[in-house]
Image (cartoon, rainbow, N blue to C red):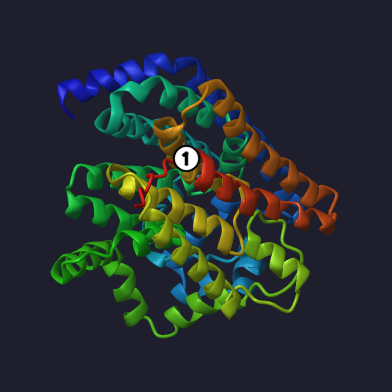
């Protein structure tokens, strides 16, 4: 880290110190609260937490049959957790944490998440300075709102891996904006290893007029996944179990999720998130994205790919939760800070309102269980993107003769 970058980071932390303190308070309170419930519910065998899934799946992977990480019955029976649904190599990341008891490990993990959240938004500041330093104030306001959004509570409470995805994604964007493709695409590969949330970013970002350049991009992305490829090829049945868990295990039922795909599943219970509906939905959105991208300011095409690619995931994937907004809103903060033409305070209110409404819907899904709410969410996920594309985003004026 250069001296200039270090000074910039110190200034960023000083500017955001009170807001960062709120983030720390969120992490501490949720850790204490969840730890209390762990101690209580472990006695009643009713404990479910995402970090527990990472933690115990890592234990299973290193001490038992690796196939058991994708066995819902085994994980539920012996560890009372949900099934592991991600790439197996990520379990290596959690190996050091398994040296600690569950609750201390959870506290350390949330501490790491706070640090990564701060670094994610700081990298965003470096991107803003590169694109348009005059927008620093606008970005600072939206970054502050990212720190205090209620989805952070959900992220810390569940022990989600979202902060890791957000940081590697933002760092990838930074290197790509600096035209350092090797580092940028390797980091994109790491985001896929954590969770396939950035798969649509990759689809938007890979195309190039030069075939060899495209091939290099694919190779860079695959490099971080090489260990997973080796595991899938070397352990019979592991790939089959992974596909089954992710696409065929969750069928029907009421999904308290915040994606359009989950709404379709609720309306049509016989659908599965592995059926062609998911592919068709994502495909249509990708076509729309490629068309819309032609009208975006050329200096922001890469940023557009990250914003819209992440957005496609949130619309089309069946199990998307409010805690995952951690790796969507930092990119939205960048985009709107650069392109909002009106009062930044009004934008801040909109920026704050969207995830808050989604959190309210999520709570109603879980505690009121009114299926009619499924018909409200499309307004947020269809109307708002349309308004963003037509009104808020920079559209180049095409002059016709």
Judging from the image, what secondary structure is the residue with disc 1 in?
helix
Report the residue marked by disc 1: 332
* 386 left or right of 339 in image: right
| Residue found at x 55% / y 55% | 314
Q: Can residue 286 be seen from the camera position used here?
A: yes
Q: Percent from the top left, x then y, of residue 44?
A: 77, 53
Q: Which residue reaches farthest bottom?
A: 236
Q: Quadrant of the N terminus?
A: top left
Front residue of 140/167: it is 140
Q: Nearer the viewer, residue 77 or 237?
A: 237
Q: Nearer the viewer, residue 232 or 327?
A: 327
Q: Residue 332 at x, y = what percent?
A: 47, 40
Residue lying at 65% horizontally and 76% vertically, measured from the top left: 272
Q: Percent x, y for residue 394?
A: 42, 40
In the image, residue 77 sits, relative to residue 392, either above or below, namely below
Q: Is residue 246 visible?
A: no
Rendered residue at 17%/66% (across/down): 216
Which sits in the foreground, 135 or 83?
Answer: 135
Write down the quadrant of residue 29 in the picture: top right
Identify the residue at image location x=38%, y=48%: 304
Answer left or right for 358 relative to 269.
Answer: left
Question: Badge 1: few (under 14), some or many (20 or more) residues near its Cα, within 10 Å?
Answer: many
Instruction: Tell me: 52 left or right of 363.
Output: left
Percent x, y of residue 378: 69, 55
């Amino acid at each position: 880290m250069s001296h200039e970058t270090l000074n910039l980071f110190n200034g960023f932390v000083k500017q955001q110190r009170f807001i960062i303190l709120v983030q720390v308070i969120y992490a501490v309170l949720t850790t204490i609260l969840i730890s209390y419930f762990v101690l209580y519910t472990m006695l009643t065998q009713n404990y479910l937490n995402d970090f527990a899934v990472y933690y115990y799946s890592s234990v299973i992977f290193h001490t038992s049959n690796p196939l058991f990480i994708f066995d819902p019955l085994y994980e539920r029976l012996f560890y009372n957790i949900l099934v592991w649904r991600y790439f197996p190599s990520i379990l290596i990341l959690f190996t050091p944490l398994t040296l600690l008891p569950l609750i201390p490990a959870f506290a350390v993990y949330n501490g790491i998440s706070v640090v990564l959240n701060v670094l994610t938004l700081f990298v965003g500041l470096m991107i803003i300075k590169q694109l348009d330093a005059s927008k620093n104030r606008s970005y600072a306001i939206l970054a502050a709102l990212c720190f205090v959004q209620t989805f952070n509570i959900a992220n810390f409470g569940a022990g989600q891996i979202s902060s890791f995805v957000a940081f590697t994604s933002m760092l990838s964007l930074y290197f790509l904006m600096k035209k350092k493709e090797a580092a940028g695409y390797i980091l994109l590969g790491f985001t896929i290893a954590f969770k396939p949330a950035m798969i649509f970013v990759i689809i938007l970002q890979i195309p190039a007029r030069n075939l060899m350049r495209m091939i290099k991009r694919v190779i860079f992305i695959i490099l971080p996944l090489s260990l997973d490829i080796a595991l899938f090829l070397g352990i019979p049945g592991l790939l089959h179990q992974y596909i089954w868990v992710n696409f065929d295990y969750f069928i029907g039922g009421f999904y308290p999720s915040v994606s359009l795909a989950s709404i379709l599943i609720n309306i049509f219970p016989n659908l599965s998130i592995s059926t062609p509906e998911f592919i068709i939905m994502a495909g249509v959105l990708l076509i729309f994205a490629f068309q819309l991208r032609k009208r975006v300011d050329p200096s922001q095409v890469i940023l557009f790919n990250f914003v819209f690619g992440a957005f496609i995931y949130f619309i089309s994937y069946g199990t998307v939760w409010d805690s995952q907004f951690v790796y969507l809103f930092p990119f939205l903060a960048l985009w709107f800070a650069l392109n909002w033409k009106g009062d930044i305070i009004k934008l801040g209110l909109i920026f704050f309102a969207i995830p808050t409404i989604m959190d309210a819907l999520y709570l109603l899904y879980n505690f009121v269980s009114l299926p009619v709410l499924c018909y409200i969410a499309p307004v947020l996920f269809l109307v708002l993107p349309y308004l963003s594309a037509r009104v808020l985003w920079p559209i180049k004026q095409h002059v016709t003769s």
